[in-house]
Amino acid sequence: MSACSTWLVRGSLWLKVRRAGAALLSLPKAGDVRARARRAHGAALAQEPRWEEGRSQDGKKWKTLEHKGPLFPPEYEPLPQDVSFYYNGKPLRLSIVAEEVATFYAKMLDHEYTSKEIFQKNFFTDWREEMTAEERDLICEFSKCDFGEMHRYFVEQSEKKKDMSKEEKEVLKEETKKLTEEYGYCLLDGHKEKIGNFRVEPPGLFRGRGEHPKMGKLKKRILPEDIIINCSNDSKTPEPPKGHKWKEVRHDDTVTWLASWVENVQGSIKYIMLNPSSKLKGEKDWQKYEIARKLKLKVETIRKEYERDWKSKEMKKRQKGVAVYFIDKLALRAGNEKEEGETADTVGCCSLRVEHITLHKELDGQECVVEFDFLGKDSIRYYNKVPVDKRVFKNLKLFMENKNPEDDLFDRINVSMFLLNNYSNMTLEEKLLSYNRANRAVAILCNHQRTAPKTFEKSMQNLQQKIELKQKQLDEAKAELKKAKSDYRESKTEKLKRLVEQKEKMVKRLQEQLKKLQLQMTDREENKVIALGTSKLNYLDPRISVAWCKKFDVPIEKIYNKTQRDKFAWAIDMTNEDFEF
DNA sequence: GGCCTAACTTAGAACACTCCAG
DNA sequence: CTGGAGTGTTCTAAGTTAGGCC
């Protein structure tokens, strides 16, 4: 029982890691993970040296890599004479290229995909592009196309295949086995490893998931001339099929793929990679779970942090706090933005829209219930009614105020905010805030207080107004940028290009200004009744401050005024960035 | 320093195989 | 045998994120 529940705890924790782990933790170095794991599992691993063989630290994925290249699908076999496509009721012999594309459609006829208008439209457009000029002249209306006979032929063929004798089936099986033997393995650092997908994807009609705007488009046949081969310098280069050439042969040992090509429907790159059973993939998988174990040690801190953020002055922080809470509690995906009109409309945490949640003050005897209803990855529906913390509920209400259903629920954040927030990508203002916070922690400890300045409330109000104005300007600029971008997509003129660039600059500038104001606000607010001077002048070793400034590229004048610089001249003089107290 | 995309993991659909009841 | 439920495997679409590029 206890073993079982331990596993369950791990399991649910893992879910959170899987979906948010890298987002909340900086990635450990490979060697670090390996060393820890070795200590933890030393005995067990001693029996399986395969996993322990020195893995390089420098991003190199292999020393040698040899393979036979990918396996191509068979060439197109034309239909027999007595099977025909019909147009407007009459049989029509198609050119071989047009016929092949027609068979893709004919084969899918009893799939409900083919009944969808977008599917038909996309297919018809792409098909006509493959036709000869004469065919294109003749075949103008999809409704006059009849693929029935072709369809029946393919159904017949698959029946025949099913009815084959045992011996015939055995022969086929032998053949595929032989091909797998030949193409299904590679040599990586001298070890024979199974390849995951050693076949080039055959041509056909693209079937996206859900309401995909590109469903039915022609996925073109891939030729050797489209394929990049990756293998080691000194190994045998795979032979391209007779009469063909590879697009390129490269020797990149920083990646794990053996071959790649660009697919024409979405323009994305497809790869031939190793099977999950391989050493390379296995080690990566192991590393992943080691990160999960590291997260386990930090998760309580993370939870405290996001609960604190629920009460923040900054809207951005509140949104971040609630978003991370969702990811933690519900294992939602991060939710990157997607190009509109290029893919199905699906969302994750950060891309949730107002229309995707409903708030219930009370539902089925429970308080503060959030009802989720949205399409996630692969257009799978996420439906859930979740009682949440009262403070989260209140925040959600706030986030939804004065918004339209199609507006972003978390309009002030995006996925990148969760990634590695270290000094190297902090602005000067952020660094100073963190310095002042450290200073404040000391002051609070020493009970160095002050009465809030008389003008405090008034000046905060002014600042707040400034921020609101800036936010409004930023929102407007963003909208203008969006419009400029879409205009530019429509017609790619120099003038519009310049306009986009100009708007981009504007948004960037406003964002920076807003950020500065917000940081100022936070700092002032936190400093309301705290006196920093005493601890800064008398208790904090100035060498720590000087080293910090040097290490993180902060000018010393930003933390010490003239008098302070004079007082600490000795420290400024003698301290380098490595100083440790 | 923000944006873009190459490289990688994740995931459901489709297909293939197995096993057991009738 | 046969067929269909259940399970395993293959395929490729759909995500995420590090790091390169400007």
Image: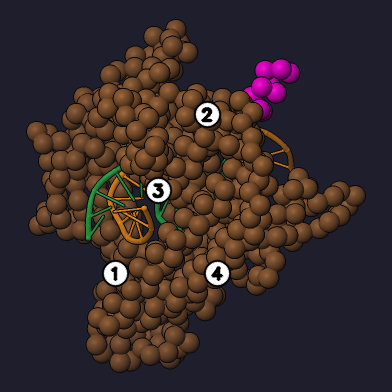
Chain colours: A brown, B orange, C green
Are the residues at dot 4 and dot 1 in contact (C-beta closer than 8 Å)?
Answer: no
Which is more toward the observer, A169 or A372?
A372
First along the sequence among labels 2 and 4: 4
Tag 1, which chain?
A
Q: Nearer the viewer's eye, disc 2 or disc 4?
A: 2
Are labels 3 and 4 on one chain? yes
Q: Which residues are magenta?
A: A1-10
First along the sequence among labels 1 and 2: 1
Q: Position of residue A497 (x, y in %)?
A: 29, 77
Tag 3, which chain?
A
Question: What residue do we see at 49% from left, 43% from top?
Answer: A433
Which is more toward the observer, A100 or A260?
A260
Provide the residue designation for mark 4: A469
Provide the residue designation for mark 3: A427
Provide the residue designation for mark 2: A535
Are labels 4 and 1 on one chain? yes
Are the residues at dot 3 and dot 4 in contact (C-beta closer than 8 Å)?
Answer: no
First along the sequence among labels 4 and 1: 1
Q: Quadrant of the image for the N terminus of chain A?
A: top right
Question: What residue do we see at 40% from left, 18% from top?
Answer: A581
Residue A122 belongs to magenta span: no
Provide the residue designation for mark 1: A78
- Residue kind at label 4, given as amino acid type: Leu
> Between marks 3 and 4, how big is the CA–CA gap?
22 Å
- Residue kind at label 1, given as amino acid type: Pro
Q: Position of residue A33 (x, y in %)?
A: 40, 23
